[in-house]
Image (cartoon, rainbow, N blue to C red):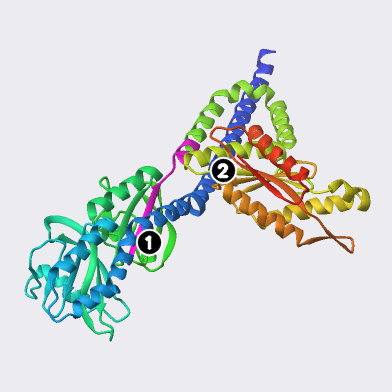
Amino acid sequence: MQHRHKPLANIRTKTLWLFCLVLFVVFFLMSWSSYHVAQHAINRQIEENSLPLTSDNVYSQIQRDLVEPTFVATLMAHDTFVRDWALESSPKPAPMQRYLAEIDKRFNTTLSFFALDKNRRLYLPDNAEHIIDNNSPKNAWYNQVKTLPENKPYQVKVGTDPEHPGKMDIYIDHKVFDYQHQFIGVTGVGLSVTRVKKLIEDYQQRYQRTIYFVDRNGKVILHGQHFRGAESLQSIPGMRSISTQILSAPSGSYRFSRNGENIYINARLVPEFNWYLIVEQQASPSQRAVFKSFLTNVFIALAITLVVLTVSLLTQGRYQRKLAAQASVDPLTLALNRLSGKELYGLMQEECQRQAQPMSILLIDIDFFKNINDQYGHDAGDTVLKGLVNKLKTYIRDSDAICRWGGEEFLVLLSGCDKDQAYTLAERIRTGLQTQSFLVGSQPLAITVSGGTTQVKAKESLEQAVARADQALYTAKKNGRNQIIITE
């Protein structure tokens, strides 16, 4: 009897172990697949949204802080006082020095200057006499500017401050012509490299990115104090293969691997300086969190597989039913359902807070929708609802989302969007919809919408934000419909 049951027990033991192995492998593959899907989504979010958006923000601030001296130099080169003074037979230094001192004071430049070609004198705000000596290497810049091509009236260079030896400045050197377009000198301004580096470091700390400038040859021109790169793009480990792509396009997003970690690059040419602004981001904390979550799931699966074996089928069936019950899409309009909208709101809110970006919501309601159902039937109402969602999708970005909040009411989640931008978008939607019609059978049907929009506050729940938007929507209806109300 004992021997007769022993083979059966062995079979059951082997079957148990085999089933455990299969269960674990399945769980592992599901976790691995989810991990890769999440990684891909995060990579896409970085490459297509967060990093380009950061680059745009940095670029606009760099333009404001660095491009202004270029405009100042251009204005000086076309200033009638500068040209009239230079055309005098024996111009006196004092008026020009006062003019240059006023430029420094007004525009907060480190140094302003004018080099007069006919007497080879360099005029600065001080009272010293500066002679342009062709044999001196420190004056080579003058001949470089003088020989610039016709379509390039200025150059940007990093050089030594003549008033403070050992101190480096960024110079914008601009050619000056008389009224007959004859070359008469060079003018321009200087901006302290220290100040620019401080700006870069401020941007790095604000956006948690590595920021630096390179010239058209890939040489690193400016960077912050804690820059850990090399002297050129070609010398940065892993970037050599993409350096040519970066330097041959006005802008672009790239990815390379360094020490086994993905590094994301957004490059943008600053035409005023002919330099590339490089914004570099390592794998985000969310990626490391996803991988940590994957490992945790694997260890948990390994630990509990034997424990849950006896109820695995029941658990699996229950889990599948739960997934089915929590389907994320509204079956009629294919917009997100309310539950999925709540979950996505939390994820978008966390991402916006992490990126220091605003977030807004828009609550839209079809005006007199009940009349449509009563007059044309529920099939017509369904057609309008589906058509509305399809048209809404043409107005929003991939990073935004549409959720069917209830009946004919739809909630639009707007990532990286403040209340004014949300209101502008909502108005565009409203005016666009009232000029379009939906085909119900063979008859066109026009609709209007009312809406309420608000900017999400820090750590605010979706219910709180929707309550404010709903109150604004109620005001829009009360005031006559076909309008958008914005609320704090």
Instruction: Work out whether 372 lies above or below 121.
Output: above
Which quarter of the rendered picture does the C terminus lie within? top right
205 or 304: nearer the eye?
205
Judging depth in this view, the residue of 433 and 324 nearest the camera is 433
Q: Which mark, by number, is residue 242?
A: 1
- In which quadrant will I find the N terminus? top right
Q: Say what amino acid the circle numbered 1 marks.
A: Ile
Q: Which of marks 1 and 2 is in front?
A: 2
Q: Does the magenta stretch include residue 319?
A: no
Q: Where is residue 485 in the image (x, y as percent from the top left)?
A: 68, 46
Residue 120 x/y as whole percent: 11, 76
Q: What element carries label 2?
A: strand
Image quadrant assignment for residue 86: bottom left
User: What residue is at 29 percent from the left and 55 percent from the top?
Assistant: 236
Residue 399 in sight in this render? no
Question: Which residue corresponds to mark 2?
Answer: 359
- Per the rendered image, the range of residues in magenta is 273-290
Mark 1 surroundings: few (<14), some (14-19) or many (≥20) residues within 10 A: some
In the rendered structure, does residue 281 fall within the stretch colored magenta? yes
Left/right placement of residue 183 relative to residue 52 reads left
Answer whether labels 1 and 2 touch (C-beta < 8 Å).
no
Residue positioned 30% across, 65% down in the render: 72
- Residue extending furthest top? 1
